[in-house]
Image (spheres, grey):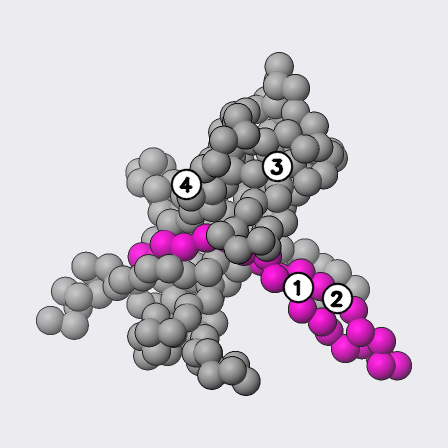
């Protein structure tokens, strides 16, 4: 049962450590650290993604800022109160870490999600006419917990996902991306923030949905 649930959320990223590891928290005597990894896109842009990792995975590994690593794990979410507001925080939870050579990796950023639409999709178009649909996907994990993953679909996938309903069971393939945006605060002060989401390259409804429709 546990293995099946884990298979619903699979992330693999390859890139350089963009920051040094910093102690985050301890759970049941096991220490966890966080750092950022810089993952290249096909364009010249890089995604800067947060990683949470157990100290036990870093034993005997000489990793520091600039080291190229491969991380396999899950994209997890948790709620954090910031300035009196509840914020959804995303992190790549590492299940395995290995050193890499500098050779090019064909696809350094991959994610697969098997989950449920938990919020009505929002369709929009950019000033340049690009179609986008924002979704929130709930993915179950062991011990009756769930991760809530923001996803963004483009083009024909945007038109398809616009019609999805809350509760629809979806399978999604794509990459984890970081995106800067500006938020206007009081006194005309503008703050630059970073959002993390899954950019969808392929999606399909699960067989469970198809059976229900039939």
The part of the chain drawn in magenta is: 171-196
Q: Which residue is mark 3?
A: 16
Mark 4–mark 2 distance (CA, rounded to whole Å): 31 Å
Can the viewer see residue 71 in this picture?
yes
Mark 3–mark 2 distance (CA, rounded to whole Å): 23 Å
Q: In front of the other: label 3 or label 1?
A: 3
Numbered tag placed on residue 106 in the rendering: 4
Q: Residue at x 36, y 54 (%)?
A: 173
Left or right of residue 62: residue 95: left
Q: Residue at x 41, y 55 (%)?
A: 174
Q: Is residue 60 magenta?
A: no
Q: Which residue is mark 1?
A: 180
Q: Which residue is mark 2?
A: 192
Can the viewer see residue 143 in this picture?
no
Q: Are marks 3 and 1 in contact (CB under 8 Å)?
A: no
**Going from the N terminus, do you reach mark 1 or mark 2 first?**
1
- Using a 10 Å C-alpha cutoff, classify the residue at mark 2 as few (fewer than 14 neighbours), some (14 to 19) or many (20 or more): few
* Of residues 82 and 93, the one drawn nearer to the viewer in this rendering: 93
Numbered tag placed on residue 127 in the rendering: none
Q: Are marks 4 and 2 in contact (CB under 8 Å)?
A: no
Q: Helix, strand or loop at disc 2? A: strand
Residue 151: image x %, image y %?
46, 63
């Amino acid at each position: 049962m546990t293995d099946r649930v884990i298979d619903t959320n699979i992330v693999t990223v390859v890139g350089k450590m963009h920051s040094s590891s910093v102690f985050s928290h301890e759970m049941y005597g096991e220490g966890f650290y966080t750092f950022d990894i810089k993952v290249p896109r096909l364009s010249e842009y890089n995604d800067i993604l947060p990683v949470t990792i157990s100290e036990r995975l870093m034993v005997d590994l000489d990793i520091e800022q600039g080291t190229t690593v491969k991380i396999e794990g899950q994209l997890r979410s948790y709620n954090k109160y910031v300035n009196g507001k509840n914020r959804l925080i995303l992190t790549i939870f590492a299940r395995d870490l290995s050193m890499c050579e500098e050779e090019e990796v064909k696809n350094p950023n991959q994610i697969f999600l098997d989950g449920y639409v938990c919020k009505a999709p929002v369709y929009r178009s950019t000033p340049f006419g690009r179609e986008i649909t924002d979704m929130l996907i709930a993915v179950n994990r062991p011990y009756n917990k769930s991760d809530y993953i923001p996803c963004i679909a483009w083009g024909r996938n945007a038109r398809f996902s616009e019609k999805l309903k809350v509760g629809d069971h979806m399978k999604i393939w794509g990459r984890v991306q970081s995106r800067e945006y500006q938020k206007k605060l009081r006194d005309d002060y503008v703050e630059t923030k970073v959002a993390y989401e899954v950019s969808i390259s392929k999606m399909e409804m699960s067989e469970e949905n198809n059976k229900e429709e039939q």
